[in-house]
Amino acid sequence: MAEYYFFCNGQYDDSPEAIEAIGNRGRRIVELATLNIPTSPGFILPNATVRSLPRTTDKVWEVLKEPLAKTEKAFGKGFNNPSNPLLVKVVESPMLNIVNTQSIHNIGLCDATIDGFGAFVGQKFAYHEYCNVIQHIIDLELLTQTDKERISKLQAYRKALDGETKTALERAFKNYRSLYPEEIYTDAYQQLMFVINLFRKVIEENTTSEDSALLIQTMVFGNFNEKSCFGSFFTHNIITGENALMGEFFTQAFDEREKAGTPIEKIESRIFTRLQEIGKQLERRFKEIRRVRFTVENGELWIIDQQPAANKSTQAEIKSLLDLLSEGIVDEEYVIKAIKPGRLSEILHPTLDPLSVKKFPKVTGGIAGAVGAAIGKVYFSTDALLKAYRQAVQTNQSTEFILAMPATFAEDVKAIEVAKGVLTSEGGYASHAPVVARSLGKVALVYPEIEFTKEGMKVAGHLVKEGDVITLNVPYYDPPAIYLGKGALTKPTPEDSGLLELLDIVQKYIHGFDVHANADQPKDAQLARLFKAPGIGLCRTEHMFFNEDRINRFRYMIFAETQEERMAVLEELKKDQSEDFYQLFKIMEGYPVTIRLLDAPLHEFLPHTKDGMADFVKYLQKRKRKMTPEEVKIRCDLLREVNPMLGHRGVRIAISYPEIYNMQVRAIFEAAYRLKKEGVNVLPEIMIPVVMTASEVKIIRNGKKIEGKTIVGIRDIEEEVRKQFGFEEPIHYRVGSMIELPAAALQAGEIARYAEFFSFGTNDLTQTTNGLSRDDFNNFFSDYNEMDLLPQNPFKVLGDQVKEMIKIASERARLVRPDIVLGLCGEHGAEPENIPFAQQVGMNYVSCSPYGIPIAKLAIAQYNLSQREARAN
């Protein structure tokens, strides 16, 4: 191994031995030199040299004199030269990115050189830097010094230099100069050797620095004269991804702290053209956006440093990769592998401008329910928010609102739909509010420490009253936060972000297994098509009843006292549902649309608040039904269940009230045959939820008649509707089952006799397999996680026991029906960690909210590429 490694333009050692020895910072410098990018000369002392340095400065000189002489010659200045001094910086260059010691700049600035340096940069700056040199020498010694008396004196010396002026320096020298050898103030060579010995001591004593090298590099100054400047730039715009330099420069300035910068494009054209060339060189070499720092000294350009642009937006990352692809620098596979799937969340939701909330109180923490950022007036009930929303619409005011409640229920969906975000204190990632928010593209945060009182909402000692403006920020990588004030957002534009072009590439690497959408509304279906979803994997029909105009009608149906009364209301609801299905089928022409029949317990549709009760009583009166609020409450209480998640819901409702599923199935086929008449190809799939036995599916599919009660099956309803529309041949449709209970998973073979597809509802399957409540789980998850009992949240990443249930169900179903279609429609579907298992078990698709489709598709493409590479090897 060499004793040192010299570098300057076009002169470097990039042998494997050198690259291994010079550390991370050294490698970055050599990378510049290999591209023949103007780099101020210097040399690197590998760790072996640093550790073997003699303890006396005279001996150290034997190591330094040759590389320092080369540096002087390459730069045209002399070290310790009184009139035009060469100054250097000494920087720790560790093997990893962790730097434990601060670099020291302007070594060589001493009594002998300060006047010559000041003649170029000004006396004020010269003495400022001289003070800094001594302060940083003190800081370096303090890292290893143990003598308390000396530590105290060094700290006093450092404080005396704080003025960073000639006066401060002279005053400090008078009292403390003798703490260091006189030579470091009078001789630049002695100063450099002294500093390197201090670094050696730090590296030897600090275990995290034990493999570090030392970089010694020439200093250049943007404040040298009127032909000088300092600046930095990104090789692409890190916000928009525009293929143009983004940065600023500072004329006659040493760094960016001195004054406001000037946009980089206004720099001297000769320099700007060279910076553009350098930007292109770096992007082609590293295949990503880079941040570059530069100095122009006396008209000559020097690149100080370059590194990855750590704070670039996802949009910038995508567009820069697409540019590299179009230039032939990277291929499609590189583009796919370069982007982390989770980062796409940023492009699909509004993002917060961090400067806009700088002055507001900030509360950090909680559980990220749905990523994005939202701003709005906070309201503590659905009724209050909807009332404010109506007034805002009527008066043409802002409709930015945030719903804040302990927890949300089915009746609160309409408020979440019009709100920008939802804030709750109960539940977790898979609880009601986050699930609904993700399906609607809203922001959701669960913050358990919120206390809701009559006065408002208490959070971290702050009282937020109804109508106050708050900002929710739920980013993908950083902890979520609540800001008590109005921030500013950047709205997403998928069409301009490069996302659709990326999806075009990704789709080429997806074969067979794909991503369907959870969609209940036309706008969801349109977004799903935009993101290339080949079908709807879950349409939750109960969500269609939460429309403000329909909810009371549905409640009236529940309150019906006779079959005739219930059938009359169901006929009204059927018209609404049929129109909803018509819109979804039309948008998804030629693709399957999986419609889950009513799943939620009936009590979830009933009013939970006084205002809701009063509103429903008024509706009853309109329909000539006289009931007092007290009577309504009693009826609601009678319908309320102790454990509704395992209660009267899903297929169980159809057994008790077959007319409800009858209405829904008729609505599906009426919409389908209506479109068939219009020449539209429709592929409806009817899914039965909360199944535990094959007999339940058999009855719903084929019907059953006993004395006094008839359940008309899907098969007979389809035939009736087909004849009604005058068709002989039936449309192609499937009947399937949700698999969300262990009993259904274990009986999958029997159920498959009557079901042509299965969709695994992994939220409920996780709850019923593990005996975990998704709404209460977060109360103890952190304890289980800390003790390694649950390394990951089972409502985000499928647990082993749930995977085993899915495997059993899949294998048993295929033995009976080899061509059965298998999908996963829980919230797990959008999590990249679950994609490999879903493919390995032989599923046909996962289904998730439209906003999760790009994430899941990218994860699938990456997995497919990794499998192909594994087979090749």
Image (spheres, rainbow, N blue to C red):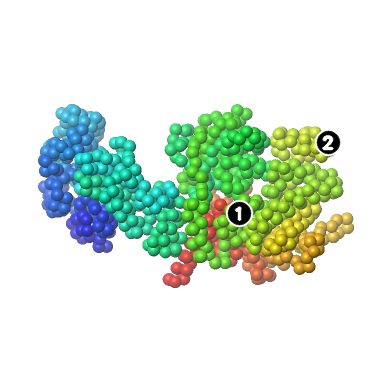
Comes first in the chain, label 2 or label 1: 1
Per the image, label 1 sits on a secondary structure element best described as helix
Per the image, label 2 sits on a secondary structure element best described as loop
Q: Nearer the viewer, residue 781 or 466?
A: 466
Instruction: Please tell me which residue is depicted at 58% across the width and 31% down the height of the picture.
Output: 467
Q: Is residue 545 at least partly visible in the picture?
A: yes
Left or right for 539, reference 81: right
Amino acid type, residue under disc 1 in the picture: Gln
Amino acid type, residue under disc 2 in the picture: Lys
Left or right for 412, reference 324: right
Instruction: Please tell me which residue is depicted at 11% across the width and 40% down the height of the picture.
Output: 82
Q: Quadrant of the C terminus?
A: bottom left
**Residue that label 2 marks:** 626
Instruction: Please tell me which residue is depicted at 64% across the width and 57% down the height of the picture.
Output: 587
Q: Is residue 780 at least partly visible in the picture?
A: no
Left or right for 758, reference 144: right
Q: Quadrant of residue 528?
A: bottom right
Q: Nearer the viewer, residue 442 or 757?
A: 442
Q: Position of residue 394 (x, y in %)?
A: 64, 35
CA separation in Å, label 2 and label 1: 43 Å
